[in-house]
């Protein structure tokens, strides 16, 4: 296995230079670079810029230790995390909790920020050499194929189940089943809950509820204007609003917004978008590869129709989005210049912050579906009763792992568990800037969970926005069908290939069939290089296909 990882490292270092970010960076206002930290405060194009971070802070949970209770004296816990700064996504909460953690344990906390493109290469180099420079990484969930497969990180069951009172308590059962599955690999917990990524649809509620628009839409399309349930309805709504003034500035705006720059995470959005064209009641897991041969399935008729449908939608967005990264698309929606989009939880929270033009106007709902899907195993299209909707955990779901080479694993677990406590997670999920998205029952409003609407309103939320948002995520993560998350060695490189060819289709360099065929060819090349038999074994295990 070690031999494989050294080979994979050279591949992934190259791949990591192609993608500039992965999953949900949120608002990050300009700030001075912390002394001794690495990299710029935020990567260009990856953060929303039209809103400002608020002042909401989580409560102190851990009390200062005394005497023998300070079990981490003379220890330093080093965390490697994506660059963002003290008010930035994922890294920001570490600066908030540092004093509390150090006082409660006697340890010192070192926050090492690196640009996203350098994070995995630096981490895997540290692990393959056994250096132990980093005690923990706030890792992307798709890295587990490499990290567990290489036996580089610690299983956390013993720490989690500890009854001595030594560690702060967090509840893995509070996490909904979809994102909960990403915290484990096989029978072991390997990640401490933090961020819970998944994509939902956002829409301008004020536009869809406007009587004049409702009447005009019905005249044009023959049915009532409503929150889209299918991608066909999504197209109709986007087409109707495209070119209209949506924010009162006298300028024409757009039916939708996306971001399709290579390296801008467009491949994640294709995954969520395409899921109901392929996944369905009789095909819950076959999307990426044939588990018997590791032959890619990406050129199936379902994938092709999905890409054709996605490319057709491009005409209803701004031409500039072909070169946009994530934050630029978010900004377009936050300025009130688009009626629809689909993306991570950050956007719903960012819409509540100062500078947003869509506060109180932002509805959210699960991703639209289809009325039929292509069952790959059966080799045929299948109709469904109602609408085929598929939940997703698309994105990084950034969470802490502990290096096997850490000289302070207990101290490191204390840090991660402290940040995972319900009291802190509850606040993280309400803020837009910290990059931590909802995924726990304690984040949701009744009857889905235990959160309080008064707390959301006190945090700056519009009550209807909060209700739509939390309900959308509860429904997404709780959907009967879930998009199969890829967690095998080389996942980053597979996704990079998809990203490149998706952009080729969006810009007209290839038609959808050609783009998907090129994706299949690249997937085969990657699999052969990494070892088809080994990839098959890990793929089957990661999706539970052999059970």
Image (cartoon, helix red, strand yellow):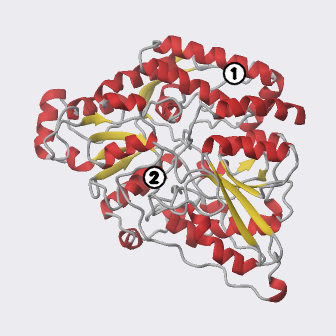
Check the image and report above or below for 200 versus 304. below
* Whether residue 224 is situated above or below residue 519 in the rendered picture: below
Mark sitting on residue 290: 1
Please name the residue shown 45% across and 41% down the image: 326
Label 2 sits on a secondary structure element that is: helix
Q: Is residue 201 visible?
A: no
Out of 233 and 246, give the one closest to the viewer: 246
Q: Where does label 2 land, which residue?
A: 346
Q: Is residue 117 above or below residue 47?
A: above
Q: Which of these two is toward me, 4 or 11?
A: 11
Give the position of the C terminus as an image quadrant: top right
Badge 1 density bin: few <14, some 14–19, many ≥20, Cα 10 Å: some
Q: Report the front residue among 264 and 458.
A: 264
In the rendered image, residue 107, in percent from the top left (x then y), is placed at 77, 74
Provide residue 436's location: percent of width, then percent of height. Answer: 53, 57
Q: Judging from the image, what secondary structure is the residue with disc 1 in?
A: loop
Identify the mark nearer the N-term, 1 or 2.
1
What residue lies at 84% left-to-right and 54% top-to-bottom? Answer: 132
* Residue for point 70% across, 43% down: 120
Along the line of sight, the residue nearer the viewer: 293 or 193 = 193
Report the disc number at residue 11: none
Q: Alpha carbon of mark 1 to alpha carbon of mark 2: how far? A: 34 Å
- Residue 217 on image: x %, y %: 16, 34
Q: Nearer the viewer, mark 1 or mark 2?
A: 2
Q: Within the image, what quadrant is residue 214 found in?
A: top left
Task: Provide residue 281's location: percent of width, then percent of height.
Answer: 54, 32
């Amino acid at each position: 296995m070690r031999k494989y990882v050294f080979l994979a490292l050279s591949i992934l270092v190259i791949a990591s230079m192609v993608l500039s970010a992965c999953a949900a960076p949120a608002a990050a206002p300009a700030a001075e670079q912390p002394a001794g930290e690495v990299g710029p405060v935020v990567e260009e194009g990856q953060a929303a810029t039209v809103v400002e971070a608020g002042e909401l802070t989580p409560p102190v949970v851990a009390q200062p230790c005394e005497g023998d209770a300070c079990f981490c004296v003379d220890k330093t816990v080093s965390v490697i995390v994506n660059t963002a700064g003290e008010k930035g996504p994922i890294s920001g909460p570490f600066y908030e909790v540092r004093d509390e953690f150090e006082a409660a344990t006697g340890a010192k906390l070192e926050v090492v920020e690196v640009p996203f493109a350098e994070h995995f290469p630096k981490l895997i180099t540290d692990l393959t050499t056994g250096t132990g420079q980093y005690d923990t990484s706030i890792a992307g969930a798709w890295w587990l194929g490499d990290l567990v497969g290489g036996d580089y990180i610690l299983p956390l069951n013993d720490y989690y189940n500890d009854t001595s009172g030594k560690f702060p308590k967090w509840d893995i059962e509070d996490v909904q089943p979809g994102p909960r599955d990403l915290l484990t690999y096989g029978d072991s917990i390997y990640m401490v809950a933090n961020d819970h990524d998944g994509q939902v649809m956002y829409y301008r509620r004020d536009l869809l509820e406007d009587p004049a628009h409702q009447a005009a839409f019905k005249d044009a399309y023959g049915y009532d204007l409503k929150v889209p349930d299918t991608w066909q309805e999504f197209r109709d709504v986007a087409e109707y609003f495209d070119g209209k003034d949506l924010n009162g500035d006298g300028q024409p705006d757009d039916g939708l917004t996306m971001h399709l720059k290579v390296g801008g995470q467009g491949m994640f959005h294709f995954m969520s978008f395409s899921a109901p064209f392929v996944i369905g009641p009789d095909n819950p897991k076959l999307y990426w590869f044939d588990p018997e041969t590791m032959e890619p399935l990406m050129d199936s008729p379902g994938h092709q129709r999905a890409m054709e449908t996605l490319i057709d939608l491009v005409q209803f967005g701004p031409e500039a989005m072909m070169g946009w990264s994530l934050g630029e698309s978010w900004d377009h929606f936050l300025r009130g210049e688009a009626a629809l989009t689909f993306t991570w939880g950050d956007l719903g929270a960012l819409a509540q912050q100062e500078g947003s033009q869509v506060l109180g106007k932002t509805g959210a709902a699960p991703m639209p579906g289809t009325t039929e899907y292509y069952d790959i195993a059966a080799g045929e299209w299948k109709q469904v009763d109602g609408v085929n909707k598929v939940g997703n955990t698309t994105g990084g779901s950034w969470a802490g792992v502990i290096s096997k080479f850490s000289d302070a694993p207990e101290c490191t677990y204390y840090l991660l568990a402290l940040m995972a406590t319900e009291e802190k997670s509850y606040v993280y999920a309400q803020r837009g800037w910290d990059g931590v998205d909802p995924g726990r029952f304690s984040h949701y409003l009744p009857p889905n969970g235990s959160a309080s609407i008064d707390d959301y309103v006190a945090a700056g939320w519009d009550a209807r926005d909060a209700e739509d948002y939390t309900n959308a995520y509860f429904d997404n993560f709780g959907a009967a069908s879930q998009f199969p998350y890829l967690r095998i060695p080389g996942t980053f490189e597979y996704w990079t290939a998809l990203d490149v060819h998706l952009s080729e289709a969006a810009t007209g360099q290839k038609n959808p069939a050609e783009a998907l065929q090129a994706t299949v060819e690249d997937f085969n090349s990657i699999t052969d290089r990494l070892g088809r038999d080994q990839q098959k074994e890990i793929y089957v295990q990661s999706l539970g296909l052999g059970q």
